[in-house]
Image (tube, rainbow, N blue to C red):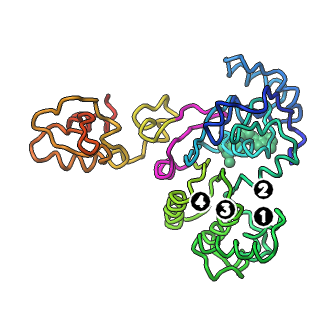
Amino acid sequence: MPSSSDTSPRASSRTSKLAKTYKLECRSLWKIFGEDAEAAAQKIDPNNTDHDRIINDVHDHGGIVGASDVNFTVAPGELFVIMGLSGSGKSTVLRSIAQLHRPSIGQVFLDGEDLTAMSEAELMEIRRRKIGMVFQNFGLVPHFTALQNIAFPLKMRGEAAASRHQKAEEMLKLVGLEGRGDAYPHELSGGQQQRVGIARSLAVDPEVWLLDEPFSALDPLIRRQLQDELLELQSRLKKSIVFITHDFAEAVKLADTIAIMRDGKIIQKGTAAELLLHPVDDYVRAFVEDVPRLQVLTLADIMTPATRKPSKALKMAASTPLETAMLALTGGEDTIAVMADDRLLGKVSRQDIINAVEMVS
Ligand SMILES: Nc1ncnc2c1ncn2[C@@H]1O[C@H](COP(=O)(O)OP(=O)(O)O)[C@@H](O)[C@H]1O
Ligand SMILES: [Mg+2]
């Protein structure tokens, strides 16, 4: 349910042709919190690009900016990661996508349909059929067994007992908890509880999967294991995913695209390599600082396009990590011919690798 501080959306059109090519699109999304959120939101001129000024105006009117002019798209099968420090607006964006917060300004398109223009009843249907959510604190019903928790959304959807039981068993198996269906949440470890949360969110076979720091409460080993399982699941299920984390290593491992948020805004969006090689400011730089560049960056990320094979060059695939390439360069060659199968894409020198790792470019 939207909170009392919610403001009505100023939607302009209900469908978007452009947005249909994406699974999900957030367009110029703002969320203002506070007693007088509506009045504060009314002060915003969406065409005013001086966002600092807008934010100050909102503050002056007693509002809190949760999300400010957030724009991004998620393609079918894409895993989109949102990162940022605590309080930067990540959860606000995620909840605004599902319309658990009604955006103050802007639109959210799912399959080209504007969710901000829908009634609560329509949204309830969309959430039941198309959206799966997982939260950091698992959010299981304590007096339901694992199986009952997983079957719950199916029950809400009016499915018959036998069919929802069977589906819940399948989901339990999918997340590796076969045989634990009768356990209550307190009888399960954190990692197991989150598996139940994941199974529950997948039970209705959602098209969009929203995960808000799902692994943050787990210890590192379990966390890595669940990351691997998420990737494995995604390779089969191909959902459109928005995944929130504050751990860049996790983002690098999972993301197709990463957006970095600060003070409600997305300040940079790109692949892990783009953020590593071209951070827009010190905030982004601080996030990417500790990443092992030699392992994360590949030849494709740093090559110079070339049409003729450099002489005395070592042929290597574009997807080769820099670490592997560097080790291969000890044979006397100075240059790598970067290949896609038999086709020459570009070249990389030993110095290019050193520059990329030391960021002296
Ligand atoms: N329901 C709310 N009412 C008032 N302020 C909120 C509410 N939810 C979030 N905020 C504020 O919005 C900002 C972004 O919060 P949030 O999206 O939860 O950040 P994150 O998930 O990145 O930690 C913070 O300043 C937070 O205090
Ligand atoms: Mg949060």
| 134 relative to 286, above or below | below
Residue 77, image x, y percentages: 56, 49
SS at mark 4 in the image? loop
How far separated are the C-alphas under marks 1 and 2?
7 Å
Q: Residue under label 2, please give it.
A: 128
Task: State yes or no: discs 1 and 2 in contact (Cβ < 8 Å).
Answer: yes
Q: Amino acid at mark 1?
A: Pro
Q: Residue under label 1, please give it.
A: 153
Which of the two discs, 4 and 3, sits closer to the camera? 3
First reached walking from the N terminus: tag 4 or tag 2: 2
User: Is residue 255 in the magenta section?
Assistant: yes
| 116 relative to 316, above or below | above
Q: Amino acid at mark 3?
A: Leu
How far separated are the C-alphas under marks 1 and 4?
22 Å
Q: Nearer the viewer, residue 67 or 56?
A: 67
Q: Residues within 10 Å of mark 2 (few under 14, many from 20)?
A: some
Q: Nearer the viewer, residue 233 or 22?
A: 22
User: Is residue 130 in the magenta section?
Assistant: no
Q: Residue 202 shows which numbered tag?
A: 3
Q: Residue under label 4, please give it.
A: 215
Q: Which residues are magenta?
A: 246-269
How far separated are the C-alphas under marks 4 and 3?
16 Å
How far separated are the C-alphas under marks 4 and 2?
23 Å
Instruction: Look at 63% across and 83% down and name the residue there.
Output: 179
First reached walking from the N terminus: tag 4 or tag 3: 3
